[in-house]
Amino acid sequence: MKSTPDAARTGTRPGPAVALGLVILCIEGYDLFILGAVGPSLLAHPDWYVSKSTLGLLGSLTALGMPLGSIAAGWAGDLYGRRLPMTVSLAWLSLSMLLSAVAGGVTLFAVTRFLTGMGIGALIPLVTAYVSEAATPARHSLHVGTATTGLALGGIVTGVVGRALLPEWDFRTLFLFGVIPLVLTPVVWKLVPAAVQDRPARDPLAAPPNPSAGAPVDSANRLGELLTPRYRRTTLLFWAATFSGLVIVYGASTWLPSLMVSSGYDLGSSLEFSIAFNVGAVVGTLGAALIADRGHLKAATMAGFLLAAVAMITLSTPQPRPLLLLASAVAGFGALGTQALVNIFVARSHPAGLRGTALGFSLGVGRVGAIVGPSYLAAVAVLVASPRAGFYAFVVPALLGAALIGRLGADRRPLATAG
């Protein structure tokens, strides 16, 4: 199937869609990783009296807003198209980061992190669905994977900015950069189609053609479709795998710099490990996407979870600095990269009219892991005196995620083979 005819029939070309998705998720990645970057500065703030438990709570509050954003945006994206909810979510995210930058106390700051979480939660399913519908079938995983590397690129920017400005600058200054999404709202309004569109290739996992398919479908029916015998087992496995993946992603984004400081590294060194973490996520995701497009999406996703476990064990032990940086990069792929592959798996397994809801609920229900992750790591750090305990805590969800993906059926690559 040629890309030009596909673009004509869907109304969206892959190149601009991937580029826009990459930029949006890069900004979102910055907003996601900023709490981890400023974590040591928050702990050292002379007036806010932030403890490790409070830092974990702030991470969990950020994550608490995400299921609301994910589920609402997934529904809205399928019902009304991707354009409107994506534009609203970008504006919401910008204003929330602005409020974080001017917060005068930890209570107001906590509220703004909850609001930021809602914006972050909304954008990932919308962008993933939008790019998935524009992607060339034979390069579906690569196109969607390239866009989702924006999360890791945003994390790299966070690490670079944090290393350059902290601890000399007030940590709240870093949140001002999160206002940038406002300038993208007119671009989104121009480029993103108002209606849900997909390529003519049909997904064999999708329901058979329905004469009333063009009629409006309410959100309850879409959720009900996900829980019919046709989708139920896959849906529940995706939800559980996303839970495991997001425990790793959000636990690491909140705690990795602080864990490195606890292991004896200074703040600058810990941010270097955070940068390596995100570089590994970018490179690993692109490499895994190429493998996935050759029919090995399931194997690549399982390998990502297992590599996360190996990397965290390595980071917990005294090793030469180059090896630790490499392990941090592998951990980045195992966390962010693997979750990107799970999202791609969800997108490939559902038709356009159900894709946003499937992604929204997978991320929404799975984001219980994002809520649990930072507090789970905080509890381990408080209850176990050893600085290695925080790293070992990541191994359990990594092994669980690999086992859950292993229970899914073989990769049927519907978008690449159909049509």
Image: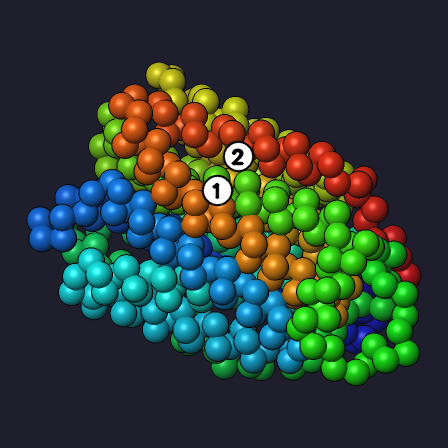
The amino acid sitting under disc 2 is: Pro
Q: Quadrant of the C terminus?
A: bottom right
**Is residue 164 toward the left or the right of residue 389 in the image?**
left
- Residue 174 placed where, x, y %? 27, 58
For label 1, the residue is: 247
Residue pictured at 41% horizontal, 73% vertical: 92
Q: CA distance from mark 2 to mark 1?
A: 7 Å
Q: Are marks 2 and 1 in contact (CB under 8 Å)?
A: yes
Q: Residue furthest left?
A: 46
Considering the numbered disc 1 on the image, is that residue within a helix, a strand or a loop?
helix
Decide if residue 315 is on the left or right side of residue 309: left
Density class for disc 2 (Cα within 10 Å; few <14, some 14-19, many ≥20) is: many
Q: Residues within 10 Å of mark 1 (few under 14, many from 20)?
A: many
330, 384: nearer the viewer: 384
Q: Between disc 2 and disc 1, whose residue precedes?
A: 1
Residue 293: percent from left, percent from top: 75, 46
Label placed on residue 397: 2
Q: In this rendering, is residue 240 above or below 192?
A: above
Q: Secondary structure at mark 2?
A: helix
Determine the image quadrant of residue 71. Answer: bottom right
* Image spot of residue 317 (x, y percent): 38, 18
Which residue is depicted at the point 43% across and 61% down? 65
**Marker disc for residue 137:** none
The quadrant of the rendering that contains the N terminus is bottom right
Residue 158 makes an appearance in the image? no
Residue type marked 1: Val
Disc tally is 2
